[in-house]
Image (spheres, grey):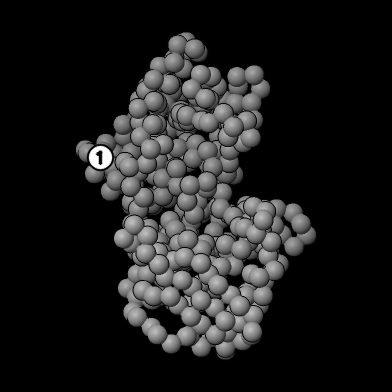
Amino acid sequence: MNAILPTSREHWHELRAEHVGGSEVAALFYLWRLADGQQAFLHMFEVPPAGAECLGCVSRHTTGYRLYWQKRGVLPPENLDEVERVQAGQFLEPAIAEWARHKWDPWPLRKVRRYLRHPRIAGMGASRDFEEHGPGLPPVEIKNVDFLIFRDLWKVEGDVITAPPLDITLQLQTQIACEKVRAEHGWIIACVGGNKLYRGQIARHDPTIARIEQAVAAFWQAVEAETPPLDVADFDTVAELSLLGAEVRSAPLDLTTDNELPILCAEYLKTDASVKEGEAKRSAIKAQITRRLGDAPETIRANASGFNISWVYAQRAGKPYRAALNIREV
């Protein structure tokens, strides 16, 4: 069955856990700088070309690496019911929709309560906010947007949206793809700063949809095979994973036979963390280093060839967390 009517909030959460939804799809894609200086977006299970450097995840809210471990059931999913921006959307979306109906009257918008499963790609789904009651049932995605973010990341002409941010574009294309009836476009509505309304008609883009379908299929294949995407590991997720099921270890690890670790340590120390791009690179390198340190509910120490490493264990609000990663050249 393509469309499912959730019977409760809990049922909706269950459906969401079983699928990669529209709001999660952007996490499957990463921006890479290629060896020739050009940039490319690859899904996280594609093998990057030799010499490519990962610049970060497309999603502004999570990472594909974390999403992988959440769908594996190793890390808990984010509790969206407690996220203030999600709560704001739940209360504001109906009002924004009514405003849009009034501003662009006649416009047959209707609330959507069904969950859509992709007709061909297992584990790909979408929850629509609203849709246009017309040919193809085009989805209508509503966003409550901060003025500065809108100014910096959105493209408009007058009050017409010509290009939303990439993560929202991927979300809308996913919603288009998951409905059996073919829609040639979808809609974006943005309420900016609480007092200005914009909308844009975004054309269906079959090449983008095909890339999303490939990414989702590869994601669930990796979950089934228990093969994490280590090339895009991020430090925060590795830190959280390191505390799960760990045993106390007192002696430093002997990693002197790991030939790549000294290269990573040297690169980490040289990376400029003062710029955003440099910080993203440092985070990726830290993830590769700390992944090798393993699990332990304590400060982890290790000796690499030419380097001493320590990863601080601390308590915050009564819960353990990983603090500073310290690397010293010896």
Residue 209 versus residue 235 in the image, above or below? above
**Residue lying furthest left:** 7
| Residue depicted at 71% across the width and 59% down the height | 34
| Residue depicted at 61% across the width and 82% down the height | 307
Return the residue nearer the eye: 329 or 184: 329
Return the residue nearer the eye: 280 or 175: 280
> In the rendered image, which quarter is residue 330 located in?
bottom right
- Disc 1 packing (10 Å; few <14; some 14–19; many ≥20): few
Residue 51 at x, y percent in the picture: 71, 67
- Whether residue 53 sits left or right of residue 69 in the image: it is right
| Residue depicted at 59% across the width and 67% down the height | 285
Residue 103 at x, y percent in the picture: 49, 12
Residue 214 versus residue 155 in the image, above or below? below
| Residue depicted at 43% across the width and 56% down the height | 67
Residue 57 versus residue 118 in the image, above or below? below
| Residue highlighted by disc 1 | 9
In this orientation, does residue 247 appear?
yes
- Whether residue 275 sits left or right of residue 188 in the image: it is right
Kind of residue at badge 1: Arg
Residue 220 at x, y percent in the picture: 42, 59
> In the rendered image, which quarter is residue 111 located in?
top left
How many numbered marks have been drawn onto this rendered protein structure? Answer: 1
Q: Secondary structure at mark 1?
A: helix
Quick one: quadrant of the N terminus? Answer: top left
Residue 135 versus residue 20 in the image, above or below? above
Residue 260 at x, y percent in the picture: 62, 80
In this orientation, does residue 205 appear?
no
> In the rendered image, which quarter is residue 296 located in?
bottom left
Return the residue nearer the eye: 297 or 104: 297
